[in-house]
């Protein structure tokens, strides 16, 4: 069984600020903000939601098909995916633009400031998805606005169950559009901040949303996650990380584990438990695609 992973492929430039943002920004001077952060450490990583989710799912033994657009500088990303054994048949190169770029700065409290250039991601709607032999699941993760709308409709038309994971793309949509996503999706995943925004814009509580889909999961970072099914909430306990190094890509690592569990037909709470384990592994490593999942992890979650 394979999963179509609709979302971004991006190059992440990640910078570490050794202080705290709150100590450098004067709240009463925000109207004339002019601030500079010294970042002694800087690195460039492969990222983007589709790439990060595919990396997690593939490591767990799932079949990942990223559906995403790269720019004319994206050749190294294609080579990277292929070297990992990830199928790139749904990755398209847009010759007249750059690959999406994220500039991410993290302070000592793991707060982040991100600047994002969408580049080729804004053309991802040109990639059409539909019924494919062996594909049983899909996910709509942050991508170009038109791509998220169209790919959700295409999944629905093809009868492919899918996860709606709006992430940082959620503010692009109004309440009516978000309600349509929920109606078409089989599962919804958000973090706690996104969950509040989703409820505000749709007028539906978490319990209400969970009655529209097969399940809603609200991730809570170090506090685990809430699994909502049929209006009822279950708390799935967190997994303590060996170290807290870099939160970039933790949510995507979690979602790769979610897809793996759904591919196996697991209960949603078990999928979430595996996600918590993989998220804990990811946060202990720098970059969104540099962690390794031990061979016995799935068996330990099943035990």
Image (spheres, rainbow, N blue to C red):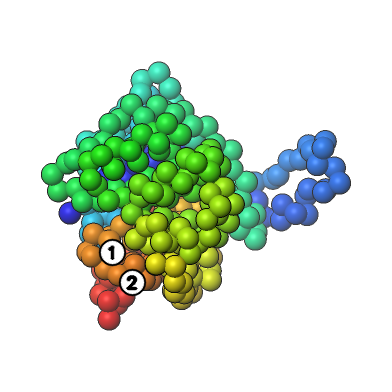
For residue 219, above or below residue 124: below
Q: Quadrant of the C terminus?
A: bottom left
**Picture residue at 58% right of the left edge, 56% below the top:** 196
Quick one: which residue is furthest to the top in this view?
Answer: 96
Decide: few, some or many residues near mark 2? Use Cα within 10 Å; few <14, some 14-19, many ≥20. Answer: some
In depth, the one of 177 and 131 nearer the eye is 177
Which SS class for mark 2?
helix
Which residue bears the numbered disc 2?
270
Expressed as whole percent of the image width and height from the top left, the position of residue 264 reads 22, 64
Residue 253 vertical placement versus 154 (above, below)? below
When asked about the image quadrant of residue 146, the answer is top left
What's the distance in space between the residues labelled 2 and 1, CA to CA? 7 Å
Left or right placement of residue 204 versus residue 163 in this view: right
Residue 253, can we see it?
no
The kind of secondary structure element at disc 1 is helix
Q: Residue 123 vs residue 61: left or right?
A: right
Please tell me whether residue 173 is drawn above or below residue 206 in the rendered image.
above
Check if mark 2's residue and mark 1's residue have beta carbons within 8 Å. yes
Q: Dot 1 corresponds to which residue?
A: 261
């Amino acid at each position: 069984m394979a999963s179509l992973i609709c979302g971004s492929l991006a190059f992440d430039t990640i910078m570490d600020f050794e202080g705290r943002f709150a100590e450098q920004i004067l709240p009463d001077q925000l109207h004339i903000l002019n601030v500079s952060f010294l970042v002694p450490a800087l690195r460039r990583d492969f990222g983007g939601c589709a790439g990060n989710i595919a990396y997690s799912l593939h490591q767990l033994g799932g079949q990942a098909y990223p559906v995403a657009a790269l720019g004319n500088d994206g050749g190294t990303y294609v080579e990277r995916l292929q070297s990992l054994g990830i199928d790139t048949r749904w990755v398209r190169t847009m010759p007249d633009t750059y690959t999406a770029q994220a500039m991410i700065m993290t302070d000592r409290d793991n707060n982040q400031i991100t600047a994002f250039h969408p580049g080729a991601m804004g053309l991802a709607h040109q990639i059409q998805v539909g019924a494919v032999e062996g594909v049983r699941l899909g996910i709509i993760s942050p991508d170009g606005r038109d791509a998220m709308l169209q790919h959700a409709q295409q999944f629905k038309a093809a009868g492919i169950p899918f996860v709606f994971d709006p992430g940082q793309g959620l503010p692009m949509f109004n309440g009516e559009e978000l309600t349509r996503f929920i109606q078409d999706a089989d599962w919804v995943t958000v973090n706690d901040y996104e969950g509040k925004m989703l409820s505000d814009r749709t007028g539906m509580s978490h319990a209400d949303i969970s009655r529209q889909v097969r399940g809603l999961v609200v991730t809570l970072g170090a506090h685990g996650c809430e699994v909502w099914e049929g209006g009822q909430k279950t708390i799935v306990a967190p997994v303590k990380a060996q170290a807290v190094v870099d939160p970039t890509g933790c949510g995507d690592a979690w979602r790769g584990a979610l897809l793996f569990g759904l591919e196996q037909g697991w209960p949603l709470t078990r999928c979430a438990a595996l996600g918590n384990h993989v998220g804990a592994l990811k946060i202990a490593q720098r970059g969104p695609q540099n962690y390794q999942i031990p061979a016995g992890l799935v068996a330990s979650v099943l035990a």
